[in-house]
Image (cartoon, grey):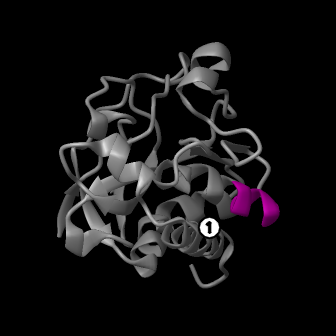
């Protein structure tokens, strides 16, 4: 199944040292095993010594848009150091505008955000090898970010995305975030790759 990978959060600026990536507008909607499959090349590079950085986009002020910061917090608790965007310090539009983002220069960047999608995709993940474009789902035109993209489909796409995000089940978002963080950690650190 194909989903648009434009995410719902309020924005991001890419690093100036990296060339602007070409945004892949369509991604595949997968379960947790699909996240692991997506990250196989990143895991191989990580095991050879390359750094991994996580850009977890969203805010703690919106139930649905908390997916990214919840994943970021769970990754930090699993011992990952290069995590930008947690529940303590969400990576939302205001923070990005004031501080920008600064992952290590040669790191593999895994961008994580929430998105809205088809009703049958809720609870799944829109993934892509390539960047996601934050805010596209709500009409913002912001710079793409990420070498790999994971967007949690937290609710259905509709005419009022802000209201949809506010009416999203916190329980669902928390479960999805914990499961995604576990899958990411296992994919990158697993010994069977």
The kind of secondary structure element at disc 1 is helix
**Residue at which label 1 appears:** 181
In reply to whether residue 75 is colored magenta, the answer given is yes
Q: Residue 165's x, y, as percent? A: 40, 50
Q: Which quarter shows the N terminus?
A: bottom left
In this view, the residue in front, 10 or 77, is: 10
Q: Residue 10's x, y, as percent? A: 45, 31
Specify whether 191 is left or right of 170. Answer: right
| Local crowd size for mark 1, using a 10 Å CA cut-off: few (<14), some (14–19), many (≥20) | many
Which residue is pictured at 79% across the width and 49% down the height?
A: 81
**Residue 6 visible in rendering:** no
Which residue is pictured at 32% across the width and 70% down the height?
A: 122
Which residue is pictured at 36% across the width and 31% down the height?
A: 21
Identify whether 113 is placed above or below 32.
above
Location of residue 182 (image quadrant) = bottom right
The residue sitting at the bottom extreme is 192
Q: Give the magenta part as a residue range.
A: 73-79
Specify whether 43 is left or right of 47. Answer: left
Specify whether 39 is left or right of 95. Answer: left
Which residue is pictured at 46% across the width and 54% down the height?
A: 64
Q: Residue 157's x, y, as percent? A: 23, 53
């Amino acid at each position: 199944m194909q989903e648009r990978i434009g995410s719902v959060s309020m924005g991001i600026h890419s690093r100036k040292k990296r060339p602007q990536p070409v945004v892949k507008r369509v991604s595949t909607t997968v379960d947790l095993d699909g996240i692991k499959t997506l990250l196989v090349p990143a895991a191989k590079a990580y095991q050879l010594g390359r750094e991994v950085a996580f850009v977890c986009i969203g805010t703690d002020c919106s139930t649905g848009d908390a997916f990214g910061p919840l994943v970021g917090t769970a990754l930090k608790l699993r011992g990952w150091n290069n995590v930008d965007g947690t529940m303590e310090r969400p990576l939302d539009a205001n923070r990005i505008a004031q501080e920008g983002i600064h992952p290590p220069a040669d790191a593999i960047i895994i961008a994580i955000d929430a998105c809205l999608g088809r009703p049958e995709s809720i609870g799944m993940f829109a993934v892509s090898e390539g960047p996601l474009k934050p805010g596209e789902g709500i009409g913002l035109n912001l710079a793409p970010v990420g070498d790999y993209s994971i967007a949690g489909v937290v609710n259905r796409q509709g005419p009022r995305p802000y209201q949809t995000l506010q009416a999203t089940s916190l329980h669902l978002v928390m479960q999805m975030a914990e499961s995604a963080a576990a899958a990411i950690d296992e994919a990158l650190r697993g010994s069977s790759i």
